[in-house]
Amino acid sequence: MSLGKQQTDFGKRFKYLMWIVVAIFAIMVARLFQLQIVEGATYQRKAENNFLHKSIIAPVRGLIEDRNGKVLVHNRPSYNVYIIPRFFTEKSYAKLRSLLKLDDEQIHHIEKRIIAAQGEQRYFSLPAVRDIDRNQLAILETNLAQLSGVRLVAETKRIYPYGPLAAHVLGYLNEVSAGEVKRLKGYHEGDRIGRYGVERRWEFYLRGIPGLERYVVDARGRKKSEAIQRRLLGSVKKRRFDPRPGYNLVLTLDADVQKIVERALRWHRSGAAVVVQVNTGRILAMASKPSFDPNMLSGRLSREQARKLYDNPYHPMLDKVLQGSYFPGSTYKVIPAVAALEERLVDPSEIIYCKGYIEFGKASKFRCSHVHGPVNLHYAIVRSCNVFFYRMAERIGMDRMARYARDFGLGTPTGLGLNSETGGFIPTKAWYNKNMPGGFRIGNTLNSGVGQGNVLVTPLQLAMVYAAIANGGKLYLPQIVDRIETPDGQVVQDFPQKIRRRVQVSPKTLNIIRSALHEVINDPLGTAYDARIPGIDASGKTGTAQVAKRGMSAKNRSDWWRFMDHAWFASYAPTSHPQIVVVVLIEHGGSAARVAAPVALKIIRDYFALMKSRGH
Amino acid sequence: MEPIFRKIRVQIDWTLLLVIMAIVAVGLINLYSASRTAVPGMFTHQIYGLILGFSAFLVITTIDYRLYNQYGYLIYGLGIATLVLVLFVGRTVKGSTRWIGFGPLQIQPSELMKVVMAIALAKYLHNDPTPEGRTLKQMAAPFALVALPVALILKQPDLGTGMLVLLMFFSVMLFTKLKLRSLLTLISTGAVILPLTWSLLLKGYQKRRILAFLDPSADPTGAGWHLRQSIYAIGSGRILGKGFLQGTQHQFQFLPEHWTDFPFSVWAEEWGFIGGIILLGLYLFLVLWSIRLAANAKDRFGALLCLGIGSMFFWHVVINIGMVTGLLPVVGVTLPLFSYGRSSVLTFMLGAGLLMSVASRRYWD
């Protein structure tokens, strides 16, 4: 620009000034160049992040049914309140609080969640209040315009119609933790995940695949018009991916049998029972007491409820069938019996005299329950003579006995794959040498022979042992899932029965043991004779597992029950053509014959009555 | 005959008029888009403002600028009087008392004070030329001239306008030469006063804005929010922009109050780098043109008046665009003839009128 004719005395300063102005404008142009051309793509993405809202559409979780198609777990529609922290204001928070009359715990929960949401998470919808009722829904809907950053989402709620029935098998859900959101692919804050039982084990199949909807929102989180959606995000197909519902799970469980089992257990505070098909390994019923209500656990537990649950001395959250390991007591005697017969260390006619105890070394006395007098193998089982089995254990030896125990599947998990099943424990000489101050002693062998000492089994393991005895030596893999189906009923995967191995035991040995197990109930001298139910043809073995008496004192009477022995009964029926094996454990129940055997026999009675009524 | 003939020799500076009209037109187009999400009627309000401003422009232009020289101190006195009046009867919005009502018209006297200041300063310097450079002592009088309105404006408080008046003052003073020693003293005084201003004069929200500028990501929903959203808007416009009415940042309200302080972000989002360059080009031309008018002015008053007004346009553009692009802290400074607001439009139209008044009379003898 030419300056033209200058009429004042400012000299060249106008020219310099112009160059300064041009230079400063050049800086602004350079800045625009940097923002719009060099970094333009980045800011375009950031601007898109502003208006792009991603909403995860939860898939409908698969159903869980029993073997007869009875629905054990399903979903019902429910309305959940979500908040989008980015758009959630003080005002809408106050409004939401007063409309829903939120309590302190809920408020704390929501605030924790908002604080935890950082960065991109602030744009996601987070569940704030679940399963609001009809009135609350109506109230929120009419006030939604003033609730910035609040969304109402129609979803489903998991329902366990039978409440605590088979709770440990079914399990429950709850929300993923912040750590899991980071660790697990495909899970977002507020998603639910299986926490227990088959809900956890088969999470992948049950969950389904979440859908995603992307849509344009304004700064207050309001969804923009369809025309704007189409212009900025394209067709509906590009914006919305529908969720795929989860697969249904058909269990081997029979809800009616489960009810029979839980009814039989109803007078006992703590214990476990399992019913397994002898010739398939399929579990018909599996109960652990005390139980919990998955409906309650799948919601948000109040502090009071959580305290009640976790401070309960009977441990409701422990699946005693799979996670409880106990001394098997006399139920274990079938192992030394099999070992002694197979190794020809005893003749079925050999008689050992029981004077009520045996002495070993100088100070050790190993006691029997009674003075049995002369007993052979048969009566040693029928009358549960410890002295006889001390002698047997002595002959067999620790490690040989352990080998037989392991052959029957003891000492390792059965492979059901549920609830972090434990494997129990079968000790060996080497183990004692390594872990005990005095190393291995012969007394350890004697204790093992009667299922005490350091032998530990789970109820399910014991059931599989007795099933193998009943079916001629086939150790089945226990199964709880029969098949997995698509929502329209096509089988995705089925689980045929599976024999883990044939146990090394001859039919002759099994016949001797089976006839003795029959007499346990049917011989007037049998330990479970008093519990027998006329007309019910069953075989079984009692077991009273001693509990450590340490800490017991007269002063400490309020928890006397802790020092009561565990009562076992392991049985199968009918004797001639066994169909089911039933194992019952009553924790701190005291006498097996008086406490555990009646429960097991009632289960057997009711089971066959049920089968009869069904026309089998 | 002669005097009358002289008066008709008024020459209209078509170039100046064209640039002004171009900026006004572009500004209206932009406001149409920017105000779509605002309260209805904003666009028509701005048109009324422009009509008012243009009328003022015509009146100011018709009057011989030497008359402003003659009555310079009277105008200055009136300006100060209204500023004082604001302190007593002004309307308070968001903690600042800036507005005063003239009938149905709400006006910010502090805005108009910028134009008044340009006149007063030009008058003072017209009568007091110091070709060998001004000493500090000689600065005292003009400084007092500017300090009074600045103090009144900061009292409102209106940091942006106060700062702008100071910038205009120093621009003109530097142009009229300072002694090197005076310059250095000024700079060092500034270095002392700045932290003092920070701790004593600035209000909490002003401090937060400046801190947010220094680190916009530190406080994503607070003061840095505006700035970040503005940068996203501008950057996402890329080369060609998203198109008229298609800017997502303001249409979806991620960029709040974009019609007053952030209209450039709206413009750059919808029209891209190309649009930004065109607008900056118009402003650059206007500023250079006012320097050229200053150079061609017949007397010192005319020259310094053009420089004062030119510097007003210049600093408004630099500070506004600097702030929306994240080069400068966020202070409420409007973009000339682009931002919504009657006081702002009126101020710049008055300024343009003064430029035109000088321009039209440069060929007089």
Image (cartoon, coloured by chain):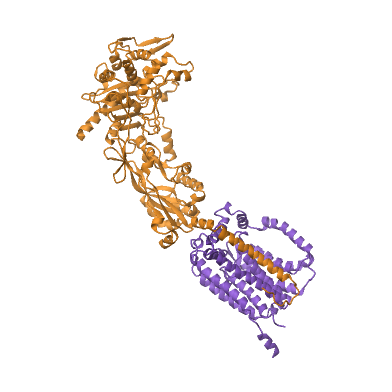
Chain colours: A orange, B purple
In the rendered image, which quarter is residue B296 located in?
Answer: bottom right
Q: Position of residue A607 (x, y in %)?
A: 25, 30
- Name the residue at the bottom extreme: B1
Can residue A433 be seen here? The reply is yes
User: Is residue A421 or residue B64 the one in the foreground?
Assistant: A421
Q: Position of residue B294 (x, y in %)?
A: 69, 74
Q: Judge from the rendering whether residue A85 lies leftward or rightward of residue A481; answer left or right.
A: right
Q: Position of residue A25 (x, y in %)?
A: 64, 65
How many labels were placed on the picture?
0
Q: Judge from the rendering whether residue B135 lies leftward or rightward of residue A223; answer left or right.
A: right
**Is B185 above or below relative to B348?**
above
Q: Judge from the rendering whether residue A116 lies leftward or rightward of residue A561; answer left or right.
A: right
Can residue A566 be seen here? The reply is no
Residue at image point 41% right, 35% down: A309
Residue at image point 47% right, 16% down: A439
Q: Image quadrant for the C terminus of chain A?
A: top left
Q: Position of residue A443 (x, y in %)?
A: 41, 14
**Is A473 above or below relative to A385?**
below
User: Is residue A297 or residue A50 the one in the foreground?
Assistant: A50
Residue at image point 54% right, 74% down: B48
Q: Image quadrant for the N terminus of chain A?
A: bottom right
User: Is residue A366 or residue A112 the one in the foreground?
Assistant: A366
- Name the residue at the left extreme: A615
Residue at image point 49% right, 66% down: B245
**Is A601 above or below relative to B233?**
above
In the rendered image, which quarter is residue A138 located in?
Answer: bottom left
